[in-house]
Amino acid sequence: MVNYIIRRLLLVPLLLFGVTILIFGMLQFLTPVERSALYVREIPKNERQIEGIILKYGLDKPLYVQYWRWLVGTTDQVTGERNGGILFGDFGWSRTGGQPVATLIKNRFPNTLDLTLWAVGPVILVGIWLGVQAAVHHNGFADQAGRIFSIVGTSFPTFVFGLLMLMIFYANLQWFPPGRLSTEASIVVNSESFKTYTSLLTIDSLLNGRFDIFIDTLRHMILPILTLSYISWATFLRVTRSSMLETLRQDYVTTARAKGLPERDVIYKHARPNAMISVITLAGFTVVGLMGGVVITETVFDYPGIGKAAAEAAGQLDVVTVLGFALFNGLILIVANVVVDILYAFVDPRVRLS
Amino acid sequence: MQNLLLDVKGLETQFKTPDGVVHAVNGVSFGLKESETVGVVGESGCGKSVTMLSVLGLIPSPPGKVVAGQAFFFGQDLLKMSNEEIRHVRGAQIGMVFQDPMTSLNPVLTIGRQLEEPLMLHIGMTRNQARERAAELLGMVGIPNAKDRLNDYPHQYSGGMSQRVMIAMALSCSPQILIADEPTTALDVTIQAQIVDLVKRLRDELGMAVIWITHDLGVVAGFAERVMVMYGGYIIEESPVNLLYGNPQHPYTIGLLGSLPRVDERKHEKLYSIEGAPPILYQKPKACPFAPRCKWAMDRCWKENPMLEVVEPEHRVACWVDTKTGRSRA
């Protein structure tokens, strides 16, 4: 087990290397002038300065020199100041964000994480439960209802669904506002007395004992959460259901029944753990899929996360920012995959012990 | 007649499929005496397994359904029991072993855990007691280092060992009946013999009755006291084992016996086989279901389905033809 986990973790640097090569390759489509944005901390004042940067950082040098500089950055001979270097978390300057890409991510990501956790948590817990119920009561009412929901869910584009939500609950009913916080709440949050623990507003507001802020946050998040997660609901339900149906047909389920186990134990102790194996794969994909979904969802609901920032950057051809996000997304994807692999090992002894 | 341990009468089981209702078991009646070993023989799709699964209420429903019949076990009809009632029979009084040991054990649970379950459930052992007993059981079926191997998972066991585990599990609560559903089919030949010997030994030690489902008449010969041959969801011949091999009556039985490879057979001779495949019955047959494959078939065989008739003491056959003479019986 420990061996297995170590082997998986050793893969991470390798995968990251692959991602950097890909993104570096894309960067080469830019002119040296555009690429100089990777190495500045503020907007250059004139073209001379840009030329200076190109020379200074060797943007006209061979690729491997550039790649290495891109990874570790350069150190100023005189001041000893380091510039650039994605390994040190310096992704360059975001023109659209008006700040370094890394700072932009640091400021925006907690909002996205907050949203994603609320979107994915209930999906995994309740979605699995519903899927199992649908399989156990195969062709029953819950199963049919779930099937209709799944078909509608998977065939509805996110942006259409998001706009519908916006139209109904914001414009017509005025139940839920877009954005991140109401004005009153953001005054509180930005004040000195509001302590930041996790940067996740839902958790911090509770830790600060401000239940009103928590509710305010949730009210702003409900529509994005629904929009972001409805496809996941549908797929989770479907995959859990079919995986469970498949498992219930297995010989060992008959064995469990032949042993005289009560149906409850047959389903929850014998069948479900096996059905979970394919659901875990899906959970990994879902996290990755949600990272894509946030771009649309955050844009539709004017929610200040990395998705919206990435969309803005893409809209203005701010390639450095977009690639910074791509790199960050790649990192999340890799982490999610490693987590899934480790979860596999927990659930399936055949993976753990081989 | 001696008191029967299991007395099945007129069992009928059907499956709903998109193509229609399949009549898998069509009025099967048989008895099982205490400590008796009965072989149930027939090709795949003859209703052997379905018959036994029906008795234990293990037919997946839907699509399967037991539509008629009774199965008395200690004076109670198993087919009328609620799920909760029959649960206490399964695993406790009637143990069952399945065809493919590699898929019959749960891959994510340890062997120990799977062996402990029935002990805790039916006998009310604590986990520790069950663990100890599980190790004994593994030892009983011939698995070395039983105590350590309890922590293993099924994929760490070979097919033969897995089948031993299945047998240990089925016998863990000292059942009166062991139903073995083609327990050697998925194993290679040397292992088959070991499994047969193991069950034989355990039967003699523990004294339970055994129903051994197989399509291999050779396996049954040295093992069972009585044989039932099934075809198309019917029992078509039933007799003590020596009579069946010495004096087979039904064309199907004769065919089955003829298709056994023999050691003293002349070389280069093609092994005999019965042409065709068993029918899938969408209706209760009005003719003999074997007629299309039978070289003795007469007019009557196409018009009436024969019922089991006594041809000599303890020997019953369902066939219109006297295969000795090729002429109609009676």
Image (spheres, rainbow, N blue to C red):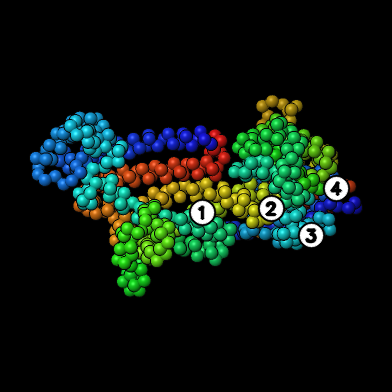
Q: Which mark is residue B157?
A: none
Find disc 1 in the rendering and name its residue: A240
Front of the two marks 2 and 4:
2
Crowd class of label 3 (few under 14; some 14 to 19; many from 20; radius 10 Å) = some
Is residue A166 shown left or right of residue A144?
left
Q: Are marks 2 and 3 on the same chain?
A: no
Q: Is residue A101 above or below residue A51?
A: below
Image quarter hosting the C terminus of chain A: top right
Q: Which residue is mark 3?
A: B77
Residue A187 location, x and y as percent?
Answer: 30, 63
- Which residue is located at x 64 percent, y 43 percent? B105
Residue at disc 2, secondary structure: loop
The front one of B200 and B45 is B200
Mark 1 element type: helix
Quote the CA–CA distance across marks 1 and 4.
46 Å
Q: Are marks 2 and 4 in contact (CB under 8 Å)?
A: no
Q: Amino acid at mark 1?
A: Thr
Instruction: Using the image, name the chain to which the residue with label 4 belongs.
Output: B
Q: Residues within 10 Å of mark 2 (few under 14, many from 20)?
A: many
| Residue under disc 1 on the same chain as residue under disc 4 | no
Mark 1 vs mark 2: same chain? yes
